[in-house]
Amino acid sequence: MSIRPEILNKLFSPTTKLQGIGPKLAQLIEKIAGPKIVDLIFHIPSGIIDRRFSPPINTAPPGRIATFLVKVISHKPGATARQPYRVLCVNDSGEITLTFFHAEKDWLLKSLPIGEERAISGKVEYYNDRPQISHPDYILPPQEIDHLKTIEPVYPLTTGLSSKVLLRAIREALTTCLPHPAEWLNETLVHQHGWPSWTEALKFVHAPQSEADLSPMTKARQRLAYDELLASQIALQLSRNHRVKVPSRIINGSGHLQKKARVSLPFKLTSSQEQAIAEILADMANGVRMLRLLQGDVGSGKTAVAAITMIAAVEAGVQTALMAPTEILARQHYKTIAPIAKAAGVSVEVLTSRDKGKTKDRILTALAKGEVDIIIGTHALVQETVSFKDLGMAIIDEQHRFGVHQRLILRNKGENIHTLVMTATPIPRTLLLASYGDMEVSRLTEKPLGRKPITTRAIPLNRMEEVITALQRTLSTGSRIYWVCPLVEESELIDLAAAEDRYRSLAEVFGDKVGLIHGRMKPAKKDNIMAAFRSGGLSLLVATTVIEVGVDVPEATVMVIEHADRFGLAQLHQLRGRIGRSDKSSTCLLLYDAKAGAMARARLKIMRETEDGFRIAEEDLRLRGGGEILGTRQSGIPDFRLADLSVHNDLLAMAQKDAKFIVHGQSVDIEQRKEILRPLLYLFERDAALRFLKSG
Ligand code: ADP
Ligand code: MG
């Protein structure tokens, strides 16, 4: 770890250093922002409250926050514990009652002494036609009324944390902990855009005077977003630079095993598969450690690319590993790759947490001795007991389900090994830049030959009966059908109950042809059900969304997605990718709630229009805007705190250019600028990259 620039010391103290923030409140703050003061200053307001509003009491509109100067007349404790405690107050414009539930009498008498004046603020309500405020937000001495009458920022909160406490903490953080660092951005750029300094920008963001000030397009927000994007781009460039500089082993086979493997393939590789293979082999042969992302829709044929390149690596004398996120996927990869490897005379094993005892020991010993060339498995591969004779290349499928940490452990099982990451998430170009800027990218853009397009239709939920009747006809032709149940709640259990209900109702119609699969099942049971579905023993499979992303049942030609309006675009696309995998035509039925909002309808429309994952991803980013979370979290895209890629797109491209210039440029000016940039990198905790700054 690098040494923290001194000017940031206060910002990186725990929030408990702020007045009135004890361990309990700190925990709540951690939930919404983070453990440190810097997290608080990056917690930006989501709204405003205008406390300047101070109408005559007798005309105060209900439901609106208002501030009044009043005189306390009398206290009326509730007759029973359930009744509220009332404090009657007046001014020239009328009477208002302050009500308190579960009141502490002593505290109320002290804060609202009879006969004295107080400044109060809170939401006005009417009870029996009389104005009241229950639990005012503020009760202050009368001379504080001017302080009170301001526009107050509203922050995202969590239960137990009041806006007042949070506001006070943030205000203190802003006044006592904000440093004034030297400008780390290019002065010309700052000038051109009319951006405020970092410190001024933060102050502005926390003191919005209107709704417009909350926009991510204000100069202050743009500046802060740019800072964050620049920090992340510099970190990516630095780590890429570092990787490229460390010499790596050269893996360059003669091609003889690869040739045998290719001959055994039951199909001809598409030209994008060929191109990806060439790119991967070139990476491994050129003496630079490979870190490449292979992107391709479900069904685009990533596994074949993995198989050929692994065999090519084996041919050059190293072992290779393929890690998949689930048991089903690992075994499916094994099934696909084993025959190809066998044809080439390469030994393959599969290892998951299900393998125990003798089998496991045998595989581990063989791996360590170098008798296994290709190992396919789940995260079981990163266990301590797994060692290789000479691991030279690792492939990680669906990387977003693995932490970067696991990727590193696997990498450390060999020396300077080459890594290929495969993902079925079509990540828009902009997001790629933001999150995988340190990787090279290959894309599979074609569908394997012979695939028919999928017909997608949107049908209102209230026509489900008709759909079921139609399915009856489809089933009689021997097709396989997926029925995907909606995401109802955050809770998996509730989703499960919905899927079970649907399973029962469909079983009433279709009998024992119907199966159910969900995430809570034991892996062996899931495998059995998938096997039955694959073989045709089951022909209609009811599933929660947890059915595996890469599951390959070419006979499945129909997918019904119930409540498609509740799914994100990326998810709908992933789901639909499970059909249309053969030369028979396929149909996807999106059942939607007629009451669904405009956004949901827009998503369904795009689904009907295109099957192109990359276009869908771009549309998703555009539609989603900053607010909705769906998609990004699953795809491993970093959560930016101040930048919002749906609106700060152009800033990202600028930041990338700037970062390249800083990292690769050589001049006295740039050396100076790197020094000045240290606090910025540290601020966004890209400090791991800092150690590369020195070495250049
Ligand atoms: P992905 O992992 O990208 O989802 P897979 O590698 O599982 O895709 O391939 C999906 C299916 O397509 C498999 O059944 C595979 O055998 C088949 N396939 C792969 N490449 C081709 C190709 N070039 N032509 C025809 N079929 C292919
Ligand atoms: Mg796959």
Image: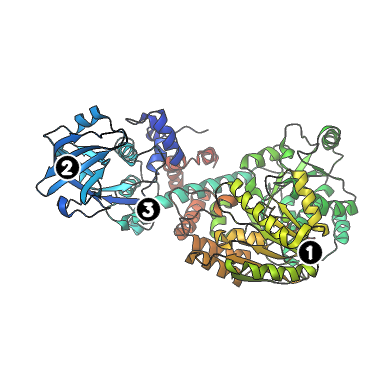
For badge 3, the amino acid type reads: Arg
Residue 186, relative to residue 409: is it above or below? Answer: below
* N-term mark: 3 or 1: 3
> Where is residue 229 drawn, in percent x and y?
47, 51
| Mark 3 residue element | helix
C-alpha gap between disc 3 and disc 1 = 51 Å
C-alpha gap between disc 1 and disc 2 = 73 Å
Residue found at x 63% / y 67%: 464
* Numbered disc in front, either 3 or 1: 1
Nearest the eye: 413 or 669: 413
> Where is residue 87 drawn, in percent x and y?
20, 38
| Mark 2 residue element | helix
* Numbered disc in front, either 2 or 3: 2
Residue 267, relative to residue 662: is it above or below? Answer: below
The local crowd at label 1, few if under 14, some if 14 to 19, many if 20 or more residues have their Cα within 10 Å, is many
Residue 26, relative to residue 660: is it above or below? Answer: above
For badge 2, the amino acid type reads: Ile
For badge 1, the amino acid type reads: Glu
Residue at image mark 1: 555
> Where is residue 311 drawn, in percent x and y?
82, 51
Nearest the eye: 520 or 388: 520
Q: Quadrant of ligand 1?
A: bottom right
From where the camera sits, is residue 58 visible? yes
Position of 385 compared to 624: left or right?
Answer: right
The local crowd at label 3, few if under 14, some if 14 to 19, many if 20 or more residues have their Cα within 10 Å, is many
Tags 1 and 2 touching, CB below 8 Å: no
C-alpha gap between disc 2 and disc 3 = 31 Å
The local crowd at label 2, few if under 14, some if 14 to 19, many if 20 or more residues have their Cα within 10 Å, is some
Residue at image mark 3: 221
Residue found at x 39% / y 33%: 25
Q: Which mark is residue 145?
A: 2
